[in-house]
């Protein structure tokens, strides 16, 4: 469940990235939609980071690195 939520948040972040690019090209930088897309992207990235941290803290995500 947690892994699916993380993947979903990453996909939403990519969608927000491309919507910001679309608004930048379409509005030629004269609108607030680019700023809104950036705000959404930062919030989604923060939620994704919090989910990953929670996964490691709760033991639902583990690292199998041998170092």
Image (cartoon, rainbow, N blue to C red):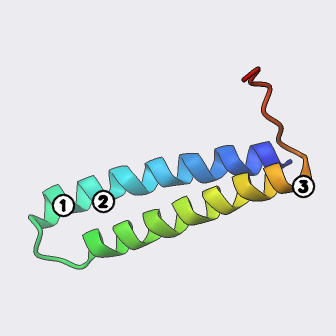
In this picture, is 44 found above or below 17? below
Q: Which mark is residue 58?
A: 3
In this picture, is 53 found above or below 29? above
Q: In which quadrant will I find the C terminus?
A: top right
Q: Residue at x 42, y 57 (%)?
A: 16
Q: Residue at x 83, y 37 (%)?
A: 62
Q: CA distance from mark 1 to mark 3?
A: 40 Å
Badge 1: how crowded within 10 Å, few (<14), some, or many (20+)? some
Q: Which mark is residue 24?
A: 1
Query: Which residue in the protein does label 2 denote?
Result: 20
* Secondary-structure class at tag 3: helix
Q: CA distance from mark 2 to mark 1?
A: 6 Å
* Secondary-structure class at tag 2: helix
Badge 3: how crowded within 10 Å, few (<14), some, or many (20+)? few
Closer to the camera in the image, 58 or 8 = 58
Q: Are marks 2 and 1 in contact (CB under 8 Å)?
A: yes
Q: Residue at x 74, y 24 (%)?
A: 65
Residue 48 drawn at (x, y percent) = 63, 57
Q: Nearer the viewer, mark 2 or mark 3?
A: 3
Sequence-wise first label, 2 or 3? 2
In this picture, is 26 found above or below 59? below
In this picture, is 58 found above or below 40? above
């Amino acid at each position: 469940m947690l892994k699916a939520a993380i993947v979903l948040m990453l996909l939403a972040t990519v969608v927000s990235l491309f919507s910001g690019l679309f608004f930048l090209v379409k509005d030629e930088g004269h609108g607030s939609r680019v700023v809104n897309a950036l705000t959404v992207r930062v919030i989604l990235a923060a939620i994704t980071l919090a989910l990953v941290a929670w996964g490691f803290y709760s033991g639902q995500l583990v690292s199998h690195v041998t170092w």
